[in-house]
Image (cartoon, rainbow, N blue to C red):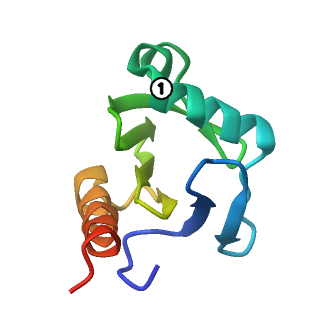
Amino acid sequence: MGSGQFDKAGILSHDLSGVEASSPGFSVSPTELQSLVAAFKDKDVAFANGITVGGEKFVTIKADERSLYGKKGKEGIVVVKAVSCVMVAHHAENVQTTNAATVVENLVDYINNPR
């Protein structure tokens, strides 16, 4: 959050079974967690169904075994798996998804390979 790239964020359990921490007013429902599990397992599901987080549905623009990115207008969501957790961050319309994604991806790289 300190990067200024996000207006809400959360840390999910590594198996996507629950929310470990989140910014005020940001929640991920059990149904949304299960849809993230499905999206990570099958990118075709992610592209067909989109990504729903915090009650908002996003069009999937990237889906692979590590990362899911979604857009809703100019807003976006970035979900990235680390070895010990899953990071999820929402950016407002004044932030580019690529800039926001770089921050989350770098944080996950640091979590996966602390120096």
Residue 88: percent from the left, percent from the top?
A: 51, 57
Query: Is 84 drawn above or below residue 54 in the view shown?
Result: below
Q: Which residue is mark 1?
A: 41
Please report the residue visible at 70 percent of the width from the left and 61 percent of the height from the top.
19
Q: Is residue 55 left or right of residue 58?
A: right
Closest to the observer, 113 or 54: 113
Residue 24: percent from the left, percent from the top?
A: 72, 75
Please report the residue visible at 35 percent of the width from the left and 35 percent of the height from the top.
65
User: What amino acid does circle 1 point to?
Assistant: Lys
Query: Is 61 drawn above or below residue 54 in the view shown?
Result: above
Query: Is 114 drawn above or below residue 14 in the view shown?
Result: below
Quadrant including the C terminus: bottom left
Q: Quadrant of residue 62?
A: top left
Mark 1: secondary structure: helix
Q: Is residue 40 left or right of residue 22?
A: left
In the displayed image of the protein, which residue is found farthest to the right? Answer: 30
Please report the residue visible at 63 percent of the width from the left and 48 percent of the height from the top.
16
Query: Is 85 drawn above or below residue 47 in the view shown?
Result: below
Residue 51: percent from the left, percent from the top?
A: 54, 33
